[in-house]
Every structure is written in structure tokens, then in C-alpha cells.
Amino acid sequence: MFIVKLIGGLFIVAATSLIGILKANEYENRTSSLRELVCLLQMLETEICYKSNILCDALLNCAKAKIESNVGIFFKETAELLKIRKMTSTEAWDKALNENLKYTSLKEEDAEILKNLGNSLGTSDYDGQIKNIRFVLKQLEVQISKADIDCIKYQSMYKKLGVLGGIALVVMLF
Amino acid sequence: MIETAVTFPGFLGDNRATILNIERNLLPFLPKMICLSIRKIPETVLQKLEEIRFRAEKPVMLSTSGGQFFLGNNGQLLKFSNDALFISTQDVHKTLEMMCEFSVYAFEEDIKNGFLTLKGGHRVGISGRTVTENGGVKTIKDISSLNIRISKEILGCAGKIIKYIIKDNKNIYNTLLISPPKCGKTTMLRDITRLLGDGDKELGFDSMKVSLIDERSEIAACYKGVPQNHIGVSTDILDGCPKQEGMLMMLRSMSPQIIITDEIGSTGDYEAIQKIYNAGVSVVTSAHGYNISELKSRQEVLRLIEGNFFDRFIVLDNSKGPGTLKEIVDGSTMEVIYKCS
């Protein structure tokens, strides 16, 4: 009987630890997603201002970049929406953000900042595009430092909480 | 030698290509309501469509060779605006945004010049409020009007004229096309460019090195540098370049046999054409005007005529539809070679 209890207890600890690790990883994923977004936006700036590609091509080229997280999905979806010519670039970017946010590790507040990008995406001259992208980049930098602090604060906490919480639960059940 | 009058069949007949071009390259950009309504216009009317005009918060207007009309809900052409289809300011903006492929920055220069060229060669004129910088136009904002000019490429329309332009299989006469507005001057010039660039076995002349200076992107209608109209296999295009500078640039850089450009008559054209003439390169160009004597009242053109640069004057008019050949006059003797009876 004791053996069975021991194995059960181990399972519980393993499960809660895993939940803790996943929760902790979310923080890490958010910072890396934000960092990659910064890279993609810088790429978009190059695509638009130096290569002078049209918006659709520029977004697709950015989406093709090999990155670890899946934030490229916003770019890809926007490009797809633009291709069917049913909505403006602002509407398309908003729609792509709203529909795909749940597949990324980004938070609602990050999405709000990204929405600013849509306001003048493609609708102004080169200077306007550069200013708009740089403005969003700056805000993203702030988000990254916030996310870094969160990461340090909560990452190890959730990991420990997972393991310890599991042990506590097991002790209580015994 | 006087022949009977001929209106070129191409100008009136086979216009299926025009309709396809409208459907493929223009309708996808238009607001849904307007697009649906235009689709209901009978083909025979659509063939004659010349312009579509959007003015913010005003009824949509269509211009055909039969005059100006308001567009109704179901593709009717109305004389009065009571039941006409209106277009909102947002829709005007949205249309332009789509025409720019959501990339206004890439079309900045075009917008500054007041028009952009769509795939298929349709040209969209833009007006609104200009933003100026250092005395020049920086951009146009608050766009309020769009004028979409339907591209009409009529292959073979210059088939009748071309034999008066060719001297022998390697040389052509310097030619000035004279025509009032809307009589097919540009269409004719485009087809002449195509014939000269391609060469023609039947008429017995070789393909020649043609340089086309397309200041207003009307002849070749380049979209991203690729001509949307047929302008011949051995034609080089300088798109959007001021004529005088362009003519000399092409003369220096592309070693052309023929230089073609549209609408001469501004100051400085004389000097440019003189240089081309001296370099032994032929020139085919056009000018606004009803006849030769009227042209002489314009000083720059008068200098060109008196300079004896042109061997052929070809006058077009609208008497039997756009592109009717009125007369052809020899430049040196002023003798009428052909006259429409």
C-alpha cells in the first residue's frame, strides 16, 4: 500500500512541478517574443524604407524570417488579409492581432502597443513609416524591460512553487 | 494622291480586351457597391467608358464618348443625380489606399505628381489638399477626388498611317502628329511606337531601336517599370522623365534610331529636337492642335515647323470617331499627301 501511495505522491509532485515550469516559461517566452518582435519590426523598417517593397511583400518577407517564437504570425496573417483586398491595412493588422494573440505568449498590454503600429501602417511616406515603427519599437523596449523584471521575479518563484506546492499537497494527503 | 477616308476599325471594334482589363485590373480596387453597379453596365456601354470620377460625398460620375453620366445603383447611366450612387470620403481614401497596395510610401513620388498608374495601364488622377515644402508640392493629403482614366490600347490603329511614316526599310520620316484632345493622339503614338519597335514584314521595314520618353506614363503605362501596353520589342522606355532632359539622356545613353515623345510645345523643346536632328536620329512626336495653321500660332511649335525638322504632319480629328485621319502633309513642300474626303 505504501508503495502505491509513494508512486501517487511522486506523480502529484511531478505534475505540479511541470505546471510550475510551464508557468515560469511563459515569462521567458514573453521576453523572447518581445525581443523577436523588435527584430521583425527593424526588418520591416528595412523592407519598407530601403528596399521599398510594397507592404504585402514586406510583411511576408518578415514573416519568413527564422525565429523561435511564433510572433511572425501577425505579419503573415496581415499580408494574407491584405491580399484579398477587403479591408484597409489598419483593419487587417488589428484583425490579425486580435485573432492570433492567443497563440503567442504576449500579453494584452503588448498587443495594445502593437495596435499603434497599425494606425499608419503603409499609409504615410517613408519618414512617417520610420517614425511610426520607431515609436512602437521604443514602447516595446519598455515592455521588454518590464517583462525582464517580471521574469526574474516570477520565474524561479513559479518553479519553486510548483515543486513545493506538490510536496505540500502530498504531505497533506498522507 | 488622295485616298478615301478610313476610320480605323480597331478604334471602334474589338474591345473585349478593354473590358477584361477593366474587370481584372480596376474593379478589385473599387468600393463594393460601385463595383457591383459597374458590373451591371451593358458591355456595349462599358466599351465606350473613358473615365470614372470619384468625388468625396458626391455622386459617382462616368464619362463615355457619349458624354458625362451619373452612375445608378444598378448600372444605369443617369443624366441627373437624383438616384445616383454616392461615394463617401472614407471610400475614396480606401480606394486610393488599395490602389497603392497599402503602400503609400512606395507611391510617394507618383502622388506628388498627382497621378498613379495601375496594372493594366489605367491612370488615376488625384486631387485634394497639397502639402508644400520649399515652394514645391511635398504630398497630397485629404484626397477628395479621383479620376480613373481607362486604358484603351488599340492594337493596329496606326496600321494605315505607318506607311506614310516609313521612308525605307531602315529610315523613317520625322513626324508630327497633330490632334485635338480626345482624338486618339496618344493611342496612335503608342501603336506607331509598337510598329516601329517590332518591325513589320508585310510593310517591309525592320525592327528599329526606339527610345520612348514617357513623361506622363501615358504611352507605355509602366507599372513598377514594366510597360503595361504593347510598345514593341526593341523599345527602351524612360518613364516619368521630363521630355527635354529625357530626349537628350536617351540620345546619349541608348543610341536610338528613333526617339518618340508626346505633346511637345513647351519652351526648350526646339533646342532638344534640334540636337536630336543634328545627331541624325529620327523623331516622332505629337502636339495639341486642330490643324497646321492653328499650330503656327504657338511660338515654340512654329519655330519647329519653320526649322523644317518635320517631314510629315499627320492631322487627326474626331469626325468619324476618335482617331479619324484627316490629312497628311509633306513637311518640306507643304503638299497634301492624303486628305479625308
Image (tube, grey):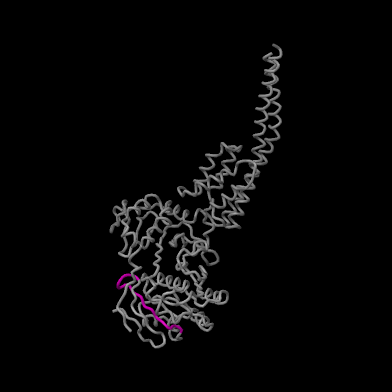
Relative placement, left or right, of B187 versus A36 is left
- Residue B233 part of the magenta segment: no
* Quadrant for the N terminus of chain B in the image: bottom left
Q: Residue furthest top?
A: A1
Tally the numbered discs: 0
- Coordinates of residue A140 in the picture (x, y in percent): 63, 44
Q: Who's the residue at 45% across and 70% down the image?
A: B194
State which region is magenta: B309-322
- Coordinates of residue A160 in the picture (x, y in percent): 71, 27
Relative placement, left or right, of B197 versus A130 is left
Task: Give the vertical position of A133 relative to B125 (above or below).
Answer: above
* Quadrant for the C terminus of chain B in the image: bottom left
Task: Give the vertical position of B142 relative to A110 (above or below).
Answer: below
Name the image quarter holding residue B95. bottom left
Q: Is residue B125 visible?
A: no
Which is nearer the eye, A113 or A24?
Answer: A24
Q: Is residue A45 visible?
A: yes
- Coordinates of residue B79 in the picture (x, y in percent): 28, 59
